[in-house]
Amino acid sequence: MSTLWLLLGVACQYLPPHVFWPAGFVAMSLPGALVLNGFLLVLWLWQRPLWALWPALLIFLFWGQHTRYFTLNTPDAQPEPQDQRISVLSYNVRVFNAYAHLHAKDPGLPERELEWVANHPADILCLQEFYHHPTKAKYNSRKRIGKAQGREVFVDKFLVNKSGAEFGLAIFSRYPIVNKGHVTFDIPTKNQVIFVDVKLPSKDTLRVYNMHLESMAIEQKDVEEAVQSEEGLKTKGRNIARRLKGGFIARSHQLARLLEHMEASSHPVLLCGDLNDLPSSYTYQQLRRRFRNGFEEGGNGFGFTYNGKLPIRIDNQFFSGRLQLLRFDVLEQIRFTDHFPLEATYVLTNP
């Protein structure tokens, strides 16, 4: 049974949820199959050593599935010259906690977060759930993170409210931005993907994408209520499943447009942001088939990026072949929002 579960979970990573939506749920359950297989290995080593050969073989064959969730890496032993390094920060800033309910217990939270982001030394910043208010100095984040710090900026807003506040995605760069735009989805949504082409000191051009794909739209309290009682499972559980299904389908459509756009690029590609999907998902698998993943290549431990009770990794950096990863970190000590920032350093190699 555990073998069948494992094989089905891996197979469902290749099935687009917009074609067969149950595949999204089976793929999501894959970590359970991996844990069960590891448990059987330990159990059978103790009780029936010969039987343990089978789960050991499965672990060997599907080792790449395990390293999506836990990995150990060491920093690059041959550091490149400082002026050739490209430092990157990607972060879901949760509108800088501007709304009262987000900073009710800590009124100074928005200012500390904005100050931390503005003063971060990264050459490129990819920010999701970006917030800017042009008439309020405190939340004039374009200026505070951009011009005041010597960075160029591209912001694509999906909403401007009645007070003039802007919401969307932002990319800040210390390198000149020579081109910019966004990936158009077939179905209008507040979720977006934007890109910029930046001119590096080496005269090469790097394309940087910032993504925020369709949200899971699940509240942590709904999950807690669903597992606390049979009634909660019926009411909240059904609603959670419906939202998950909608997210699987939407992200698979969005991914198709994103991949089409990325593969048409004539420049090396760096993709940052909030994937809103797990490492066992169809979305992650399709990106991983074409690009390398920052956590898998340079991370350590579990690399959870959600700052909450759910131990999940939904924020990522993917990069194409000419980029070499020197360092990758999930900044778990930075707890301003419900996401942890991702910090990485790359160098662009010769063609």
Image (cartoon, rainbow, N blue to C red):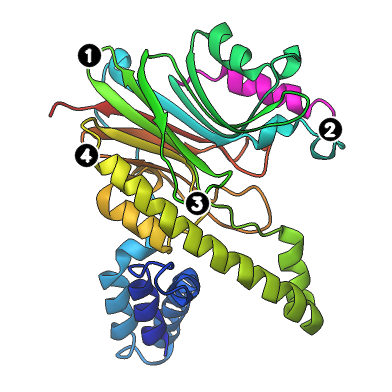
Q: Is residue 295 above or below residue 99?
A: below
Other residues around mark 3 within 10 Å, as few (<14) / some (14–19) / many (≥20): few
Q: CA distance from mark 1 to mark 2?
A: 45 Å
**Residue wearing tag 1:** 203
Question: Looking at the image, is mark 2 or mark 3 earlier in the sequence?
Answer: 2
| Element type where label 4 sits in the image | loop
Q: Amino acid at mark 4?
A: Gly
Q: Is residue 301 above or below residue 107?
A: below
Image coordinates for residue 203, horizontal then vertical, percent = 22, 14
**Residue under the point 52% across and 53% down:** 313
**Residue wearing tag 4:** 321
Magenta segment? 107-122
Main SS category, magenta section: helix
Other residues around mark 1 within 10 Å, as few (<14) / some (14–19) / many (≥20): few
**Residue wearing tag 3:** 187
> Does the residue at mark 3 contact the one at mark 4 (Cβ under 8 Å)?
no
Other residues around mark 4 within 10 Å, as few (<14) / some (14–19) / many (≥20): some
Q: In the figure, residue 162 lies in which quadrant?
A: top right
Question: Looking at the image, is mark 1 or mark 2 earlier in the sequence?
Answer: 2
- The C terminus appears in which quarter of the rendering? top left
> Does the residue at mark 1 contact the one at mark 4 (Cβ under 8 Å)?
no
Q: CA distance from mark 1 to mark 3?
A: 37 Å
Q: CA distance from mark 2 to mark 4?
A: 43 Å
Image coordinates for residue 118, horizontal then vertical, percent = 59, 18
Other residues around mark 2 within 10 Å, as few (<14) / some (14–19) / many (≥20): few
Residue 208 painted magenta: no
Closer-to-camera residue (2/272): 272
Q: Which mark is residue 106?
A: 2
43 left or right of 98? left
Q: Select label 1 or label 4 by which is in front.
A: 1
